[in-house]
Amino acid sequence: MDAEPTRATWRKATRSQGNGACVEVAALNGHRIAIRDSKEPSGPVLIMAAGQWPAFLARTRKRTEA
């Protein structure tokens, strides 16, 4: 696994309500975005190209609104 996420500056989603069901995101080198579950900071990390981020958000919003 890429060691960079362990050194990244993580931030919680702006819609986080403090109930523990949050995701955190971090900007990585090479125009990449990392996403993780805030309850498991040492758990798995999803890494994608920054250009994929808008499509990921759009698909995620559609699923949560359904």
Image (tube, rainbow, N blue to C red):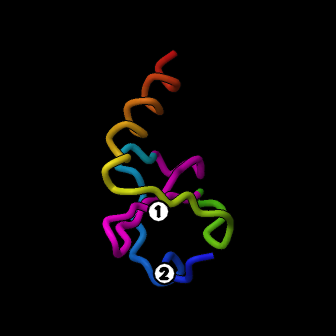
x, y percentage for residue 50?
33, 56
Residue at figure coordinates x 40%, y 66% from the top left = 26
* 27 vs 16, nearest the viewer: 27
Q: Is mark 2 on a helix, strand or loop?
A: helix
**Of the residues under marks 1 and 2, which one precedes in the sequence?**
2
Which amino acid does the dot numbered 2 rest on? Glu
Left or right of 61 on screen, residue 45: right
Q: Residue 39 location, x and y as percent?
A: 64, 60
Residue annotated with mark 1: 34
* Element under disc 1: strand
Check disc 2 and report the residue beneath it. 4
Circles 1 and 2: CB distance less than 8 Å? yes
Q: What residue is drawn where x is 48% and y is 81%?
A: 4
Look at label 1 and name its amino acid.
Answer: Ala
Left or right: where 31 falls relative to 23: left
The location of residue 43, given as percent across then percent down, is 68, 67
Q: Crowding near pointer 2: few (<14 within 10 Å), some, many (20+)? A: few
Q: Nearest the camera: 10 or 3? A: 3
Per the rendered image, the range of residues in magenta is 17-36
Residue 31 within the segment the image draws in magenta? yes
Queried whether the magenta region covers residue 34, the answer comes back as: yes
Q: In which quarter of the image is residue 49?
A: bottom left
> Residue drawn at (52%, 24%), measured in percent from left and top?
63
Q: Give the CA distance from mark 1 to mark 2.
A: 10 Å
- Residue drawn where x is 66% and y is 63% of the image: 44
The label shown at residue 16 is none
Q: Does residue 18 lie above or below 33 as drawn?
A: above
Q: Position of residue 28 (x, y in %)?
A: 38, 72
